[in-house]
């Protein structure tokens, strides 16, 4: 179970991550909002990042520049992703 409580937006994003990437062995409660999504955290890779970028655009109207250096920060954790959505969402 996640060590840090998730906000409603973080729970929604966790659901989106699990659904988009078809993470069958992961539940929303397994994703600590402050844990890394890539590498040692959930073990996501660059292809996963592209899929998540498309899902963010579809669900929240957020467009990310694929070669932006900020993307590494945005995708660092569920909490960072939630902050990005809060700042940029159009829907």
Image: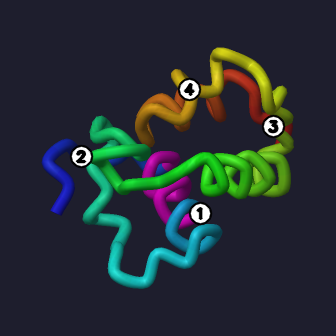
The residues colored magenta run: 9-16
In the image, residue 63 above or below residue 54: above
Q: Is residue 86 left or right of residue 63?
A: left
Crowding at dot 2, Cα within 10 Å, few <14 / some 14-19 / many 20+, comes out as some
Q: For mark 2, what is the residue?
A: 5
Residue on which the image places disc 4: 72
46 vs 3, nearest the viewer: 46
**Magenta stretch: dominant SS?**
helix
Left of 12 or right of it: where is 59? right
Q: Earlier in the sequence, mark 4 or mark 3?
A: 3
Residue plotted at (81% across, 37% down): 62
What is the spatial separation of the Cα atoms under label 4 and label 1, in whole angstroms?
A: 19 Å
Q: Residues within 10 Å of mark 1 (few under 14, many from 20)?
A: some
Residue at x 35%, y 74% (from the top left corner): 26
Single out the mark in the foreground, 2 or 4: 4
Question: x and y percent of residue 81 in the render?
Answer: 54, 36
The percent coordinates of residue 82 (x first, y second) are 53, 36
Of label 1 and label 3, which has the lower sequence position? 1
- Residue with the most extreme bottom position: 24
* 50 within the magenta span: no
Q: How many marks?
A: 4
> Is the residue marked by circle 3 packed among few (<14), some (14-19), or many (20+) residues within 10 Å?
some
Whichever of labels 3 and 2 marks the residue nearer the N terminus, that label is: 2
Q: Is label 3 in a helix, a strand or a loop? A: loop
Q: Report if residue 13 lies within the magenta region.
A: yes
Which of labels 4 and 1 is toward the front?
4
Q: Earlier in the sequence, mark 2 or mark 4?
A: 2
Q: Are marks 4 and 3 in contact (CB under 8 Å)?
A: no
The residue wearing badge 1 is 16
Where on the picture, by quarter, is residue 27? bottom left
């Amino acid at each position: 179970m996640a060590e840090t409580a998730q906000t409603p937006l973080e729970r929604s994003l966790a659901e989106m991550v699990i659904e988009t990437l078809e993470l069958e062995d992961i539940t929303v409660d397994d994703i600590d909002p402050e844990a890394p999504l890539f590498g040692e955290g959930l073990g996501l890779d660059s292809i996963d990042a592209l899929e998540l970028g498309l899902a963010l655009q579809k669900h929240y109207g957020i467009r990310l520049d694929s070669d932006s250096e900020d993307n590494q920060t945005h995708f660092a954790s569920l909490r960072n992703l939630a902050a990005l959505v809060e700042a940029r969402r159009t829907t």
